[in-house]
Amino acid sequence: MTCARLFRLVSATVALSVACAATAAEKEPERSGGPYVPTPKVVVDEMLRMAKVGAKDYVVDLGSGDGIIVLTAAREHKARGMGVDIDPELVKQSNAEAKRLAISDRASFQVQDVFKTDLSKASVVTLYLLPSMMMNLRSKIYLEPRPGTRIVSHDYNFDEWQPDEQIVLDVPEKEKVNGVPKATISLWIVPAKIGGRWQLQLEGGDAYDLTVRQAYQVLDGSASAQGKALRMTWGRVRGEEVVFTLSDGSARRQFRGTVAPDGLQGTVDLGAGRTARWSARRV
C-alpha cells in the first residue's frame, strides 16, 4: 500500500469517527438541569400534598423525567397537567404510561426547553433541577405564573427568594444517589406584585400616603398621615393576600387585605376590639 493511499484511508477513518461522535452528541440531549434521576414516590406524594393539588389544578412539571409527578397528580388527585423534558425518549415513555393508565386526557408530555414553557395556565409548578438551573429560572417562576400559584421544589431552592414552607423527609433510597438519605421539599406561593406608591384610605378615617418596597413575598416601606411619619413592618404577600403593620413608634395598626381589580382592600385592627375597612389605589 502506498503512503498516499494509507494517508487517505487514515483520514477517512478519522473523519468517520468525528462524524459519528458529532451525530451521537446531537442525539444525546444536553441536560443542563441535571442528569435524569427518578423522584421517589414518597417525595412525589409529599410535594403534591404540600401544594394541595386537587381536581381543579393544572400542574406543570419542569424537567419531568419519567413523568411520575404529573402522572400521580392526574391519577390520584384527578388534576390535569403537563410535563416538559428535553429527552424525547423519556417524553415518549411518559405519554405511553399516561395512555396505559387511561389518563392521557389529563396528563401529557412534551419535548421542550423549560425556559420556553408557558406557565400562565399553571396553578402548580414542580421542579427537581440543579441549583444553577433553579437560579436561572427564578425570574420566570416569580413573574410568569399568576399570583397564588404554588411552586414546589425537591431539594433545591431559589436562594434569596426564601420558601414559604419547607420540610425534610427521611428517604433512605436517596443515599445511593447523592449520599444523603433525606429530601428537602420547599413550597413558594407566587406573590402579587404590589411594590410602589399607594394612597390608602380608612373608611370614615385617616388617609395615608404609602410607599411599599417588595422583595419577593417580603414587604417594607413607609407612610405618612396628617404630617406624621410611619414605618411599615411585618409586611408579607402570600398570593393575593397582604398583611402589614404601620407604626409610629408608640402605636401600631395591623392591616390585612387582598388584591382587588382596582387596588387593595381589607380591614385594619384599631385596637380595643375595633376594626375598620380600608382600600388603597396606586398613585
Image: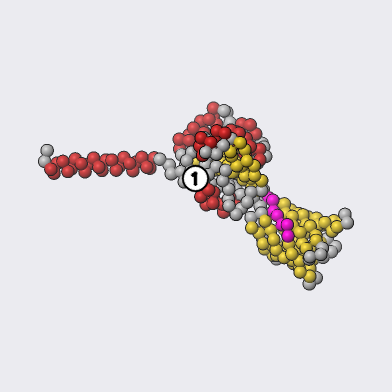
Q: Quadrant of the C terminus?
A: bottom right
Q: Residue at x 53, y 48 (%)?
A: 131
Which residue was labeled with disc 1? 33
Left or right: where does residue 242 sit relative to residue 80? right
Amino acid type, residue under disc 1 in the picture = Gly
Q: Is residue 70 magenta?
A: no
> Is 85 placed above or below 201 here?
above
Q: Nearer the viewer, residue 49 or 200?
A: 49
Q: How far across and down, in percent of the image, does residue 199 sit?
A: 74, 65
Q: Is residue 235 magenta?
A: yes
> Is 266 placed above or below 183 here?
below
Q: Residue at x 76, y 54 (%)?
A: 257
Q: Please count the marks in the image.
A: 1
Name of the residue lying farthest toward the bottom: 227
Question: Can the viewer see residue 262 in this picture?
Answer: no
Name of the residue lying farthest toward the left: 2
Q: Nearer the viewer, residue 120 or 177?
A: 177
Q: Residues within 10 Å of mark 1 (few under 14, many from 20)?
A: many
SS state under label 1: loop
Q: How far across and down, in percent of the image, does residue 191 sit?
A: 66, 52
Left or right: where does residue 230 sit relative to residue 188? right
Q: Main secondary structure of the magenta part?
A: strand
Q: Residue at x 80, y 60 (%)?
A: 253
Coloring applied to the structure: secondary structure
Part of the protein shown in magenta:
233-240
Q: How far across and down, in percent of the image, does residue 98 sit?
A: 55, 31
Question: Can the viewer see residue 275 in this picture?
Answer: yes
Left or right: where does residue 40 sit relative to residue 54? left
